[in-house]
Amino acid sequence: MPAATPDMDAPAPPFSLRDAERIVRRLAPALQQHGVWIRRIHSMLACRTSPHPDDLRRDGHLRSDFGRWLNDETNDYILSQSEYEAARDYHRKVHDIARDLCEAVRTGSAVTPEQFETFSSTLDLLDSCLDAMVKELWDLLRYTDPLTGISTRYAMLPRLKQELDRVHRTGHPCSICMVDLDLFKDINDAHGHDAGDRVLETVSNYLLLNLRRYDQVCRYGGGEFLLMFPNTSPEAALPIVDRLRQGLEETDADLGDGQTVQVTASFGIAALAPDLSVRDNIKNADASMYAAKKAGRNNVRVWDG
């Protein structure tokens, strides 16, 4: 199965890289502990050993690292996932079933094949939900720029291909825009690369906050960003992009040592032409951006063919 790309309706992955790393750091050992618990139940059933006290408690599902992660997670994106809700439900159910199995072993009662089958099938449903959750998380990490937390060009390119197909199929317009920070090398040379990183983070956050919900942004490389405006002609994109330009000009980047720097960028807009490849369409936007540079920087230019 091909790897999934981030949600087309969101301008960037739905949580920052730091959030994702925090979730992974907590989830990985919790999943390992969950595996230990499964082996513990199977060993008890096979060897008729005394159940662990936690497995006889009604709140046993909350007394493990994995159970606490499932019930204490606060990230809005995770909480909104149907797999998360299902996993939390199946986790409680599988512990309830395991408690009945433990009680049977404790009292010397027989465990019926039906009881064990119910335990195993519920465990399989839980594992399926967890697999889907973990895959989604790793896909988001794969397509996230580690510095800025927004999408990479490798996330944007499949989106552009889908949008190009839609333009070809429906005739509805789409515009793209190449954004290149002005004199970004001078900032790195004068203040150091840590300062340059702060500038990139500031610009990324600014673009995310000021794009429309259905627009897209990615870090294309270096000081370059690529924007996509679905259902928007270049003429309609021009005032949107110019507002972005003006707002960015008024946004000072904190360099972290009490200094700030004014940031401007040059913007190049092009239609997503259905008779051209994604690469050639990006070249048109790139050429428009260089025209904005030549016009004195801190400008917007539209590809005129």
Image (spheres, rainbow, N blue to C red):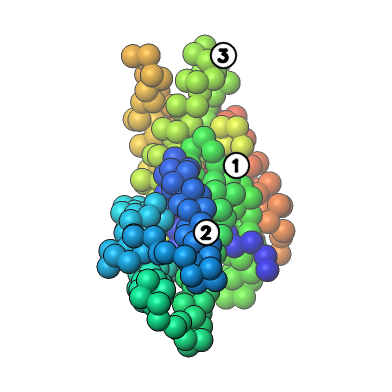
Label 3 and label 1: CA atoms lie apart by 21 Å
Which comes before the other along the chain, label 2 or label 1? 2
Local crowd size for mark 3, using a 10 Å CA cut-off: few (<14), some (14–19), many (≥20): few
> What residue does disc 1 label?
220
What residue is rendered at 39% in x and 30% in y?
249
* Position of residue 80 measured from the top left corner of the image (x, y, whole percent): 36, 64
Query: Amino acid type of disc 1?
Result: Tyr
Residue 7 vs 30, above or below: the answer is below
Query: Amino acid type of disc 3?
Result: Asp
* Position of residue 9 measured from the top left corner of the image (x, y, whole percent): 45, 62
Q: Nearer the viewer, residue 138 or 252?
A: 138
> What residue does disc 2 label?
35
What residue is rendered at 54% in x and 20% in y?
193
Q: Nearer the viewer, residue 151 or 18?
A: 18
> What residue does disc 3 label?
189
Residue 175 vs 25, above or below: the answer is below
Q: Quadrant of the N terminus?
A: bottom right
Which comes before the other along the chain, label 3 or label 1? 3
Query: Amino acid type of disc 2?
Result: Gly
Residue 243 visible, this angle: yes
What residue is rendered at 51% in x and 57% in y?
36
- Quadrant of the rendered image containing residue 254: top left
Q: SS for tag 3?
A: helix
Label 3 and label 2: CA atoms lie apart by 51 Å
* Position of residue 214 measured from the top left corner of the image (x, y, whole percent): 43, 60
Query: Furthest-left residue in view?
Result: 58
Local crowd size for mark 1, using a 10 Å CA cut-off: few (<14), some (14–19), many (≥20): some
Q: Nearer the viewer, mark 2 or mark 1?
A: 2
* Position of residue 221 measured from the top left corner of the image (x, y, whole percent): 61, 37
Label 2 and label 1: CA atoms lie apart by 40 Å
What residue is rendered at 52% in x and 35% in y?
147
Residue 136 visible, this angle: no
